[in-house]
Amino acid sequence: MEWDDYWQKAKENLDVAALAYQNQKHNACASRAYYAVFLASIAVLLKLTDYRARRNEWDHSQVQAELNRRLIMRRKVLPGELGRIPMDLMELRHEADYKPQSVTAKDAKWAYDRAEKFLSTIESTLGETV
């Protein structure tokens, strides 16, 4: 898969997060918002760095670490405010997917908004580098 394949999947997950929120499916919204950010992170790493997955398996914490290391701290291609978004959304996704309590409407909206901001910033960055 190329970077743009992951980018298309990221946008699809963001669209599904929006639909889930509109239909009051807050757990699904939080989960898809996280995956939108995760896949967008892979896309930007593939496009702008030489980082690649081992055995073609993308480790969630490693993707976040490499995004922060390579594109936020080292090269400063992405703003520092994006650095915390993947971890924050991962924590909420774990609540949505693995815990008995459900994500609230407020938290689902927060997750969608953070994911939308993340993808919008990545899209601007990718547009500037093409």
Image: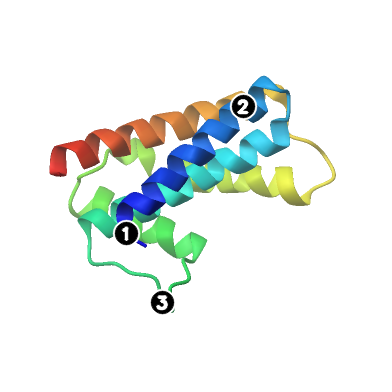
Image quadrant of residue 8? top left
Q: Secondary structure at mark 2?
A: helix
- Going from N to C along the chain, the mark reached first, 2 or 3, is 2
Judge whether residue 84 can be spotted in this image. no
Query: In the image shown, does 9 or 51 lie closer to the viewer?
Result: 9
Q: How far apart in space, not on screen, are marks 1 and 2 (Cα)?
A: 26 Å
- Going from N to C along the chain, the mark reached first, 1 or 2, is 1
Residue 92 picture location, percent across and down: 64, 42
Q: Secondary structure at mark 3?
A: loop
Q: How far apart in space, not on screen, are marks 3 and 1 (Cα)?
A: 15 Å
- Going from N to C along the chain, the mark reached first, 3 or 1, is 1
Q: Give me the residue at 37% from left, 39% from top.
A: 82
Single out the residue that lies furthest toward the bottom: 55
Judge whether residue 117 can be spotted in this image. yes
Pointer 2 local density, CA inside 10 Å: few below 14, some 14–19, many at least 20: some
Residue topped by disc 2: 19
Q: Give me the residue at 50% from left, 60% from top.
A: 60
Q: How far apart in space, not on screen, are marks 2 and 3 (Cα)?
A: 33 Å
Residue topped by disc 1: 2
Q: Look at label 1 and name its amino acid.
A: Glu
Q: Is residue 26 left or right of residue 123?
A: right
Q: Give me the residue at 41% from left, 60% from top.
A: 63
Single out the residue that lies furthest toward the right: 100
Pointer 3 local density, CA inside 10 Å: few below 14, some 14–19, many at least 20: few
The answer to whether marks 2 and 3 mark residues whose Cβ atoms lie closer than 8 Å is no
Q: Identify the disc placed on residue 54.
A: 3
Q: Nearer the viewer, mark 2 or mark 3?
A: 2
Q: Nearer the viewer, mark 3 or mark 1?
A: 1
Q: Is residue 100 left or right of residue 11?
A: right
Q: Look at label 2 and name its amino acid.
A: Leu
